[in-house]
Image: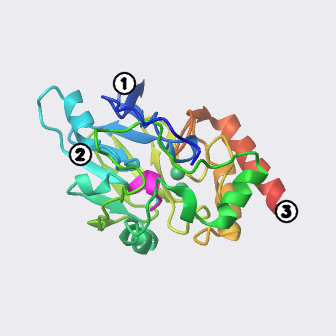
Amino acid sequence: MERETPLTVTASWFSLTWVTARTAAITEPHVDGFIRANLWYLRGRERDLLVDTGNGIAPVRPVLERLSRGGTRDIVALATHAHIDHVGGLHEFERRLLHPAETDAAARIGDQAPLATADWPHTLKERLADNGYILPSLLVDALPHPGFDPAAFRITPAAPTYFVQGGDMIDLGGRRLTVIELPGHTRGSIGLLDEEENALLAGDAVYEGQLIDTLPESDVALYTRTMERLLALPVDAVYPGHGAPFGRDTLRAIARAYLRRAER
Ligand SMILES: [Zn+2]
Ligand SMILES: [Zn+2]
């Protein structure tokens, strides 16, 4: 064991930052960087959309409800793909959107302890180590409440209530989002195009950092086509699944770097 001091309990598990008047980024500062995903909260006139739901270590819905100062909001949840750091809080919502190709992975999400890395795929650990990143044995540095046991924690699985595929429109009232298929990281990975803000919510298809395409559920040929598509996408802002938002130049640089690497 590399950690001997007991973990402290933190009062607020999530951190929230508004990036525009109607778009907020929520993260989990106390999880390891590898599973510190962004939850994107998009406000509409009639309803709101939470794009990705974190690891499920603490409930995220109360965080969103506090923003409405007692008023109730109609909140729909969508997962860009069925990885632990994106579907953990999906079960808190009555309406859950997912691509059909991710259904099996979502159903199996509670089978493994996500915060203890001992049983994680060896190939993934090796690839990360090759890039100088050694996964710690435990992926949290604090507890959401006393008595929480990170090694025993399991995500509550939640079946999707609606399937979404490329071209589908999600209408929040005064704000419409179009589903775009971005397979490669996983076969059912999706993003959303926000025409109002000329932004792409990208999930794990693109972010600044090591992109993951060596999982059993990854597909390099599909990823290559996704990158070719992203290269031509005329968006001003990208809200990625991990890390800070970036602009079109960075999107193109990430796509070009991937395509150069895939050629070799
Ligand atoms: Zn992720
Ligand atoms: Zn992922």
Q: Which quadrant holds residue 9?
A: top left
Viewer-nearest of discs 1 and 2: 2
Residue 21: mark in rendering:
1
Three-letter residue code for mark 2: Ile
Q: Is residue 228 visible?
A: no
Q: Position of residue 99 (x, y in %)?
A: 42, 66
Please, is residue 163 above or below residue 70 in the view?
A: below
Bin the neighbour count of mark 1 within 10 Å (Cα to Cα): few under 14, some 14-19, many 20 and up.
few
Reading the chain from its start, which is encountered first: label 1 or label 3?
Answer: 1
Please, is residue 18 above or below residue 174 in the view?
A: above
Of 263 and 123, which appears nearest the observer?
Answer: 123
Residue 248: mark in rendering:
none
Q: Position of residue 19 (x, y in %)?
A: 45, 26
Between the residue at mark 1 and the residue at mark 3, the CA separation in whole angstroms equals 41 Å
Reading the chain from its start, which is encountered first: label 1 or label 2?
Answer: 1
Reading the chain from its start, which is encountered first: label 3 or label 2?
Answer: 2
Quarter holding the C terminus is bottom right
Viewer-nearest of discs 1 and 3: 3
Residue 75: mark in rendering:
2
Residue underneath mark 3: 263
Magenta highlight: main SS: helix
Three-letter residue code for mark 1: Ala
Q: Residue at x 78, y 56 (%)?
A: 259
